[in-house]
Amino acid sequence: MESREISKLNNERPPKKTAPPRMKRRMKPESLTSLNNLDDGCLMHILSFLSPIPDRYNTALVCHRWRYLACHPRLWLRVDRFAKDLTQPGVFHNIESAVAAARPGDTILIGAGGNHHVSNIQIKKPLCLVGGGEIPDETTLICSRGSDSALELLSTCKLANLTVKAELGCCLLHRSGRLTIDGCVLQCETNPLDHLSYPIVSTAGDEDILGHVEVDETVVEKIKGHSVTVLQTRIEGGAKAVSTSGDLVLQRVRVMYSKAYLYFWFDVDYE
């Protein structure tokens, strides 16, 4: 009898109240901030973190405003041999003047068509040089006979989508910094003196050679190490692809054969 009364009392107790499920708070549309609500300076700063090609180039296809910002001289310096109006900011007739005017971290877009003559151009600040054509053969840098190199690199730099030709000497002289060569063509003329020609010469780590080069310490960045990284690059002519006289050696070589050319991937780094 007592057990029945106890069970009856239990049944008559009101059920425990359970907390209602929490509703997810939805953000009101007017509280969301669109990327287009940013001012031009802030949006341009965001675009500056994108790689010049293809990411920053693709942003120019979004709308007229993004095209204006993606092509702004603050993000690009342009070398255009056929430009008639040089009053526009960031437009130059030759690579040497563009390199001199560039700030550390700038990207120089070199116009396609014709040949750009270069000779012993020293790059002492981190820059990115990009060819403006669809393929590297459309943007050619020619180093004439009698020059040691087309470009002399003393800082962390990147070269992309470019063809560099040297009649005698080297295409690229790497003194210091981390150099990246991506999707380029390096070509030395074939002649009886091709043992003096090398597409890439690296003297990084050779203090005796670097000591003869006048370098402004306030301009050149402090670099922990030196290296050369080559990605999907065609190398033609010369005694060998790389000549080193410093502490760096050739490593991790990979070659891909196509119908017409050989494409190389390799690193020049500390052993």
Image (cartoon, rainbow, N blue to C red):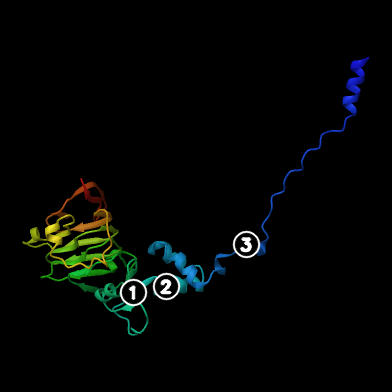
Judged from the image, the secondary structure of the residue bearing numbered disc 3 is loop
**Which residue is painted at 26% across and 76% down in the image?**
97
Q: Would residue 176 appear left or right of 24 to someone viewing this image?
A: left
C-alpha distance separating marks 2 and 1: 10 Å
Q: In the image, what residue type sits under mark 2?
A: Cys
Give the mark, 2 or 3, whose residue is nearer the N terminus: 3
184 or 260, nearer to the observer: 184
C-alpha distance separating marks 2 and 3: 28 Å
> The N terminus appears in which quarter of the rendering?
top right
Q: Is residue 233 above or below residue 138?
A: above
Query: Mark 1 sits on what residue?
Result: 78
Q: In the image, what residue type sits under mark 3?
A: Leu
Q: Would residue 89 appear left or right of 225 to someone viewing this image?
A: right
Give the mark, 3 or 1, whose residue is nearer the N terminus: 3
Query: Mark 3 sits on what residue?
Result: 32
Query: Mark 2 sits on what residue?
Result: 71
- Looking at the image, can residue 147 be seen? yes
Residue 174 lies in quadrant: bottom left
Which residue is situated farthest in the top direction here? 1
Give the mark, 2 or 1, whose residue is nearer the N terminus: 2
147 or 175, nearer to the observer: 175
C-alpha distance separating marks 3 and 1: 37 Å
Judged from the image, the secondary structure of the residue bearing numbered disc 2 is loop
Which residue is situated farthest in the left direction here? 192
Residue 104 lies in quadrant: bottom left
Residue 243's disc is none
Q: Position of residue 217 (x, y in %)?
A: 24, 65
Within-10-Å neighbours for mark 1: few <14, some 14–19, many 20+? many
Within-10-Å neighbours for mark 2: few <14, some 14–19, many 20+? some
